[in-house]
Amino acid sequence: MEIKPAGKGSVRNTEKREVSVFIRLHSLKAPKGSMKKNKVKGRGAGSGHGKTSTRGSKGQTSRSGRDFYPGFEGGQSPLIRRMPKRGFNSKFPREYQIVNLSDLGRIREKTISPGILEENGLVDDRNKLIKILGDGEVKNPVIVQAHAFSRSAVEKITKAGGKAEIVAC
């Protein structure tokens, strides 16, 4: 052990010791400099952040609760309002689950209902709208129940001796 003077008559121990440190939740601390103090504003001219409280001078940006919506162009008429709008987009569009006639050929049932389509993995949900399209062929006479059919699907089903039944929504 070596003892050296540390100034003004005091003595300091400079012996190297092995210290075992276990990290536990109660001993965790944030790294130095990672936690900044909040800037105190509006406490007079002497604070350096008084009068306008670091918000510049008057106007929209100095007010509380100020916010710009997406596409704001500083008071100029925004691009979204200058562009022409055409057509109609429904807020409640009808979205169908699509099943082709070629997919129905795998099912060995006489009556194909939304429940059977779901069991065979052709639709995700039997309660959502289902539309049968005419891509493919039907070889056996079947009764197909769905919410909508294409013209070609109805023709091919009836040609094979089957029937296309529309289910109420």
Image (cartoon, grey):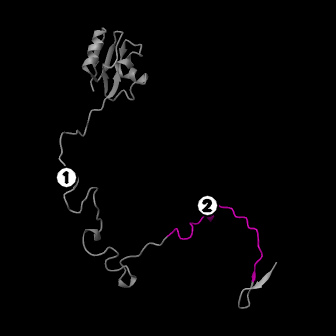
Q: Toward which corner of the image does residue 117 lie, by quadrant?
A: top left
Q: Nearer the viewer, residue 58 or 77?
A: 77
- Is residue 117 placed above or below 84 in the rendered structure? above
The residue sitting at the bottom extreme is: 8
Residue type at tag 2: Leu
The residue sitting at the right extreme is: 1
- Is residue 141 placed above or below 29 in the rendered structure? above
Q: For the residue carrying disc 1, how many other residues have a C-alpha within 10 Å: few (<14), some (14-19), or many (20+)?
A: few
Give the label, 1 or 2, closer to the camera.
Answer: 1
Q: Secondary structure at mark 2?
A: helix
Residue holding disc 1: 81
Q: Nearer the viewer, residue 135 or 55?
A: 135
Magenta stretch, overall SS: loop
Rendering coords of residue 166 (x, y %): 27, 20
Q: Secondary structure at mark 1?
A: helix
Residue occupying image coordinates x 79% and y 82%: 3
Q: Toward which corner of the image does residue 103 lie, by quadrant?
A: top left
Residue occupying image coordinates x 26% and y 18%: 152
- Is residue 125 placed above or below 90 in the rendered structure? above
Q: Is residue 150 magenta?
A: no
Region of the chain picked out in magenta, as a range: 12-35
Residue holding disc 2: 25
